[in-house]
Amino acid sequence: MSVFDPPIYTIKGAKIRFGSKQLFENVEFYINRGDKISLVGRNGSGKSTLLKIIAGLIEADEGEIFIQPGIKIGYMPQETDLSSFHTLQEVVSSGLPADGGEDYKVQMWIRELEIDAKADPNTASGGERRKATLARALINEPDILLLDEPTNHLDMPTIEKLEKIIGGYQGAVVVISHDRCFLSNISRTTFWLDRGVLHRNNKGFGFFEEWQDQIIEQEIIAQKYLNKKIAEETQWLHKGVTARRKRNMGRLRRLIALRQERREQVKQTGSVNMEIENTVWRSKLVIEAKHLCKSFQTKSIVNDFSIKVIRGNKIGIVGPNGAGKTTLIKLLTKKIEPDSGFVRIGKNLEEAYFDQNRVSLDPNKTLWKTLCDEGDHIWVHGAYRHVVAYLKDFLFTPEQAKSPVSALSGGEKNRLMLAKVLALPSNFLVLDEPTNDLDMDTLDLLQEMISDYDGTVLIVSHDRDFLDKIVTSIIYMSGNGKAEEYVGSYSDFLLKQTEEKINAKNNTAEIKNKTSLKDEKKSSSRRILSYNEQRLLTVLPEQISQTEKEIEKIKKQLDNSNLYQQDPAYFVQLTKKLEELEAKKEDDENHWLEISLKAEKNSLH
């Protein structure tokens, strides 16, 4: 497309209200042919509504829309009623024009996305239904393709395939998704819908957090001189979210240590002595499973799988849809019995289970009553919390506490269910697809809570970025009954899997070359950290600690309410110095984190 070509879709002054709530106003944007746009914002901010306006399914209360003549728009909603279709093939076919004549495209997309064409939509898995509705949106080759949470229920191979489809797509694509990795890979423009205002950045989602922080900082400065209530609202909306998003040195150190500890555990249990009784982790045993086998009819789901899960492990379970991830969780937690093998559970285990089908919520109950039937306090992790304060942790406003559950968006309901499960007394969390439909702020919150959780976590998720930040190891289920554990992050697992595939292709005659290659990799791995980086790995934490002491010293001086009146020049000098120190601290922390992540990845080779 030429830079001089006009937009194919333009909207100006769009405004929409639901009841007394102004969802957004004065929204203006344009879409060019070939644009790849990520549309982000908190649950309930109006993202799905905006997509429906572009699709022509609803009208804005006010605003002007111009669409170039002949432009086709395809739309994949977040939830779809498929009850009127008998097969998934019918679902895909319904995307073709009424005059038909292009039935070959149906078979093409069924093959491309590996859809079970004859499956009944009413009984098909969430992943199969998702692939069929995705094919339906793509089949007519729209000029503007609108996708609302397309990765929900999709397995990782299908998500990666979708990334390639979007990357080579000639038309414009607008995507709502909570999957950071997916958005970073496919987008070149970002729309951020925040408190009724649409912001645009002509860069992909990979630059979103830096851009978002700039906007928030500008807002804080602009609102410094406004009334106290507005300032408090801004602080509540953004301070916690921004703080969560900042990389945390303590958490990263702990995650690196936990991954190393898991490596030692796997080494020990993989040696000749397999008995947990003779290990230093005897008292920390959560689950011991030996030679588990489980089949349904003629299909092997789990074949000869053994594992010892120790307190504090955070284990991700990944694999294609239908590979048996949920079945493995149920086997390990003794909710179903294996065909052979055995499982034993450690003593005093208190489990909290988050099912991918979600616990039911009473739509007539308020958020307050959902969490706290009586009184105004809830017992959370060994302490009483006021129910409103706990709801604020999950990004609900105090006003929402007395609102009915029925007033919440789909994502907000999932956030409430997460709050309910995480409030349960537990030392063992089982999370089956917890990230579906959650916005990024809630994902940050969930990541923080799991990172700080002292107990053990088993988690099924297709969110690659999320897994990278929290797990100590990955169990990969290939779908043929094989399940294997890889210590480290999801990215580490991918690297190891790639190496295994390369090694499997080498024949006996190439062993010498392979050994030489390994020596070369080890040698280069040692050289990746320069002398200066190794020095900074030790020096930076001390430097950061000293900076923090200086920051605290200046803050104590600024706490003196009379300082400005007594010496305005010194007050300004201190304020400027504080800003410089805080910026220096953040730069040093980020530098340390980059070197630490590099060092951790080197240790895997």
Image (cartoon, grey):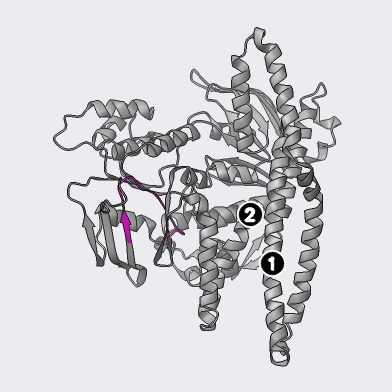
Determine which residue is flagged by label 2.
448
Q: Earlier in the sequence, mark 1 or mark 2?
A: 2
Q: Amino acid at mark 1?
A: Glu
Left or right relative to 304: residue 563: right
| Mark 1 closeness class: few <14, some 14–19, many ≥20 residues within 10 Å | some
Percent x, y of residue 319: 54, 31
* Residue 422 within the magenta-colored segment of the rendering: no
The residue stretch that appears in magenta: 29-44
Quadrant for the N terminus, please. Answer: top left
Residue that extends furthest to the left in the rendered view of this protein: 99
Residue 253 in picture, x, y percent from top left? 74, 49
Q: Looking at this view, is 39 or 291 the one in front?
A: 39
Answer yes or no: is residue 228 visible.
yes
Image quarter of the C terminus: top right
- Is residue 40 magenta-colored? yes
Q: Secondary structure at mark 2?
A: helix
408 with respect to 9 (left or right): right
**Discs 1, 2 touching: Cβ within 8 Å:** no
The x and y percentages for residue 46 are 38, 60
Give the crowd class for mark 2: few <14, some 14-19, many >=20 residues within 10 Å: some
Q: Nearer the viewer, mark 1 or mark 2?
A: 1
